[in-house]
Amino acid sequence: MIYQRSSALFAEAKKYIPGGVNSPVRAFKAVGGDPIFVKEAQGAYLYDEDGNRLIDYIASWGPMILGHAHQAVVQAVIEKAKKGTSFGMPTEIETDLAQLAVSMVPNIDKIRFVNSGTEACMSAVRLARGNTGKDKIIKFAGCYHGHSDSFLIQAGSGAITFGSPNSPGVTQGTAKDTLLADFNDLEAVRSLTQANKGEIAAVIIEPIAGNMGCIIPTDEFIHGLRELCTQEGILLIFDEVMTGFRLGRGGAQEALGIDADIVTFGKVIGGGLPVGAFGASSEIMSHLAPDGPVYQAGTLSGNPLAMAAGLAMLTELNDKPEIFESLAKKTEYLHYGLEKSLMTKNIPFQINRYGSMISVHFTEAPVVDFKSSAKGNNDTFKAYFHGMLQNGIYLPPSAFESYFLNDALSYADLDETIKVVEGLKL
Ligand code: KE4
């Protein structure tokens, strides 16, 4: 594969945009080389600026669950754009999407739209603090909830990728209110609640973690966490920016059988346009402005264009829930195919999978938290990533990410992907 035009475009971009990208993980820093510039995408395929066709396993980091340029979404956006894109005034379509989302997700009565997952998680924490009058939060090493200051403490995704899980610019004053525990370590959480009795507003967690690769909670951990939060009067925030509307209509709450107190969303809920959201019971949401004193706002929040994309995507998923099952089956097929191919390479590896999220880790021990994920051999990962890319398969350019399958992927695409792995020298 030739990537000359992408490299030239990257050099040009770096003159005007820091690092040549608008989100660090896109820059290929973890895998080396220049990032691929996409010209367009259709269904399961990316078409880059050098004319290469790539089978896409990131789906824009989750949103494009139906595949790229899905007819229903594109049509809805075109029609809505003709009538104006943003008014800064309430529109009916916001209620339509809110009603649909609330009907799909268990345990939330109301939802507020914002413009990113970061905003959703940041606002959810403020709402929890406003509801409880407490300052501290617990997060888990390797979980990523966006780039709001409180979260950039042992954060996952791009933060780990750059080896800077704690970002400069986050003050001690902020960091002191973020307590850290290891994912799947219930005792660590229990100790923090005892050492900070009555001071913790919320625990925020990715219920199925996707920002240190895909990591699945043990039943004992996630159910124990729910019980502990209930006992201690701590609000449990499920960050479902990745899992919401991907694992099923009801996301991780439904899949795990756990009721969170506040749930955050992003990615799929916007259908590929900028939408984040957070939802909770009417009681908890009654604290949010303009009903209550917890302030939160946004010029483009709920803008009709983004609402149109989100409504089209959620309507498709709500009307055809068999899509979730079909995606999970495709992911299982890919899992066993990758496993079979990698076993011929005589290297240690782990494959973690949940629903349509999957990740490959080149390490001996099971990957159950940030520490075990960080033990992965990054040189092997780089060879794997570039070997796949050279053969037309686009994977996340970091070992600390999850693949996101899309419904446009065919079994022929999966077989092609598996075959490429067979031929890799790792
Ligand atoms: P955004 O602000 O990027 O929309 O959402 C932040 C966020 C919050 N919570 C979870 C669980 C997330 O995965 C994310 C964002 N995910 C990353 C991918 N690991 C976005 C990709 C990027 O940073 O460019």
Image (spheres, rainbow, N blue to C red):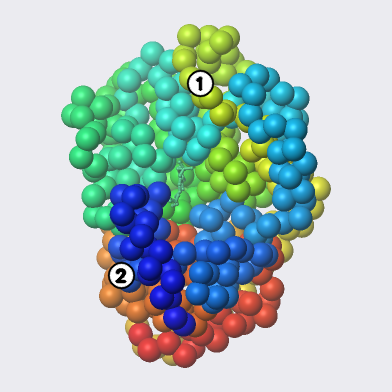
**Residue 110 % position (x, y):** 64, 24
- Which mark is first along the chain, 2 or 1? 2
Are the residues at dot 1 and dot 2 in contact (C-beta closer than 8 Å)? no
Q: Is residue 224 at all visible to an observer of this figure?
A: no
Q: Which residue is mark 1?
A: 297
Q: Residues within 10 Å of mark 2 (few under 14, many from 20)?
A: few
The dot on residue 32 is 2
Q: Is residue 209 at all visible to an observer of this figure?
A: yes
The dot on residue 21 is none
The image shows residue 152, relative to residue 193, as above or below, that is below
Q: Secondary structure at mark 1?
A: loop
**Residue 4 % position (x, y):** 41, 75
**Residue 214 % position (x, y):** 46, 58
Q: Quadrant of residue 357?
A: bottom right
Q: Secondary structure at mark 2?
A: loop
| Identity, as a three-letter code, of the amino acid under mark 1 | Ala
Q: Residues within 10 Å of mark 1 (few under 14, many from 20)?
A: some
Kindly identify the residue that appears in the image at 56 percent across and 10 percent down.
290
Q: Quadrant of residue 33?
A: bottom left
The image shows residue 62, relative to residue 285, as above or below, that is below
The image shows residue 265, relative to residue 15, as above or below, that is above
Kindly identify the residue that appears in the image at 35 percent across and 85 percent down.
426
Query: Front-most of 150 and 276?
Result: 276
- Number of residue marks: 2
Q: Quadrant of residue 82?
A: top right
Query: Front-most of 331 and 389?
Result: 389
Please indicate whether residue 384 sits to the left or right of residue 392 in the image: left
- Kindly give the residue lying farthest to the right in the view shown: 319
